[in-house]
Image: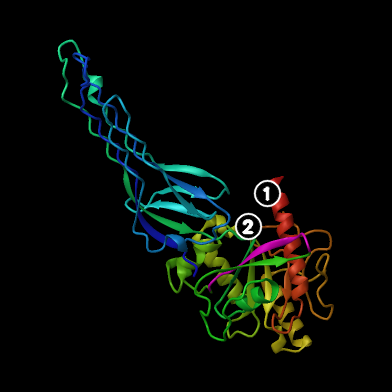
């Protein structure tokens, strides 16, 4: 099960109370106060672990609490500190305060350990309150209470490429063809209700992560359909593959523009992501029909089919659009890096897409690191 949002009450431990004690021992006259301090309560930490890829381990846990500090004891013995609690989350987890809606932490780096709630301080024992005017103090401090917060943990997928398209456009079939993922595939809309991740291998040492995202519809940025549940999952992906269904009753240009509009309305940052286009389900047409559809689409969105894809060429009988030398990462934001007709079922141009996406992702990463 993929769990992407969990509501929790989290509490740090309260400090242990100080001790009220007096030294009473044979042959020791007027031993005086010797009550020790209470132990500090346990703190709560978030730990980012790459070996965890969902929030399902936290499902059903209503209240997570660190241990309280132990009380102080006589003979100036300090109470034991409460055991800290570590909440393990996958990279890409956001911690949101439920009361205010404020984003408290954005946990993205593997191995990070971040203190969330500090435990309450232990109370002072009565040995601290001895004075010339009060030789026998009968007072010790109680420990300070811990802190309690209601938070929502949201998991946003971190993938190299996110598949974006209308429902039933072929995203699940493509990720099943290219990667080790085995999502449910069926011929009806919204088969995919939760995002699926798959590793796409380009060789023995090269691979990238692909995310199969539930389908988008008009008004998704306003919460329609799966709405924001869809859009928040692609926020962290560096690159997007917009999938356009050639066999759909909606015009290809209309599909493309709708996807861009919903991305733009949801997030200005998301709208600047580099993207490519795959025209799907071309096995429903002849080569000539596919070329006409592709050329019409290219004309409609204002780009020229003047080159073939770098490294791994598409089948020459199909029109494709790409770059001979590189993937032009300095292109305008709204222009795709390549357009490629594919069929996941018939395995037409799927290998070309595999290597084209790999090179595309690599070029974007190099640009970000520069």
Quick check: marks 2 and 1 in contact, CB under 8 Å? yes
Q: On the image, which quarter does residue 348 sit in? A: bottom right
Dot label at residue 238: 2
Residue numbers of the magenta segment:
204-214
Q: Is residue 370 in view from this perspective? A: yes
Please report whichever mark, 2 or 1, sits nearer to the chain's N-terminal start. 2
Name the residue: 32% across, 33% down: 79
Q: Position of residue 259 (x, y in %)?
A: 56, 70
Secondary structure state at the residue bearing disc 2 = loop
Task: Tell me the residue that label 1 is attached to.
Answer: 368
Q: Is residue 341 above or below residue 58?
A: below
Q: Position of residue 274 (x, y in %)?
A: 66, 59
The quadrant in which the C terminus is found is top right
- Which is nearer the eye, 185 or 70? 70
Q: Magenta stretch: residue 262 in it?
A: no
Secondary structure state at the residue bearing disc 1 = helix
Characterize the local packing of mark 2: few (<14), some (14-19) or many (20 or more) Cα atoms within 10 angstroms: many
Q: Position of residue 243 (x, y in %)?
A: 63, 73
């Amino acid at each position: 099960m993929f769990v992407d949002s969990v509501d929790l009450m989290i509490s740090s431990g309260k400090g242990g109370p100080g001790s009220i004690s007096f030294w009473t021992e044979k042959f020791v006259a007027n031993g005086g106060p010797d009550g020790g301090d209470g132990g500090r309560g346990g703190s709560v930490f978030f730990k980012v672990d790459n070996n965890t890829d969902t929030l399902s381990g936290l499902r059903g846990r209503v209240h997570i609490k660190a241990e309280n500090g132990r009380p102080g004891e006589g003979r100036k013995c300090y109470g034991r500190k409460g055991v800290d609690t570590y909440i393990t989350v996958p990279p890409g987890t956001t911690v949101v305060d439920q009361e205010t809606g404020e984003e408290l932490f954005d946990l993205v780096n593997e191995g990070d350990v971040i203190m969330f709630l500090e435990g309450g301080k232990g109370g002072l024992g009565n040995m601290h309150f001895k004075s010339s005017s009060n030789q026998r103090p009968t007072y010790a401090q109680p420990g300070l209470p811990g802190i309690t917060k209601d938070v929502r943990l949201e998991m946003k997928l971190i993938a190299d490429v996110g598949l974006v398209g209308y429902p039933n456009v072929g995203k699940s079939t493509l990720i099943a063809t290219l990667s080790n993922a085995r999502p449910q595939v069926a011929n009806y809309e919204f088969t995919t209700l939760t995002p699926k991740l798959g590793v796409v291998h380009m060789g023995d040492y090269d691979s990238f992560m692909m995310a199969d995202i539930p389908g988008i519809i008009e008004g998704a940025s306003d919460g329609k359909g799966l709405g924001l549940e869809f859009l928040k999952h692609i926020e962290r992906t560096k690159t997007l593959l917009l999938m356009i269904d050639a066999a759909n009753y909606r015009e290809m240009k209309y599909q493309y523009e709708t996807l861009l509009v919903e991305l733009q309305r949801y997030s200005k940052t998301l709208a600047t992501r580099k993207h490519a286009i795959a025209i799907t389900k071309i096995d429903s047409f002849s080569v000539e029909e596919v070329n006409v559809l592709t050329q019409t689409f290219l004309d409609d969105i204002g780009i020229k089919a003047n080159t073939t894809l770098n490294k791994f060429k598409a089948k020459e009988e199909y029109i494709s659009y790409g770059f001979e030398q590189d993937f032009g990462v300095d292109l305008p934001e709204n222009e795709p890096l390549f357009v490629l007709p594919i069929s996941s079922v018939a395995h037409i141009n799927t290998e070309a897409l595999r290597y084209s996406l790999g090179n595309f992702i690599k070029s974007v990463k190099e640009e970000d690191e520069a």
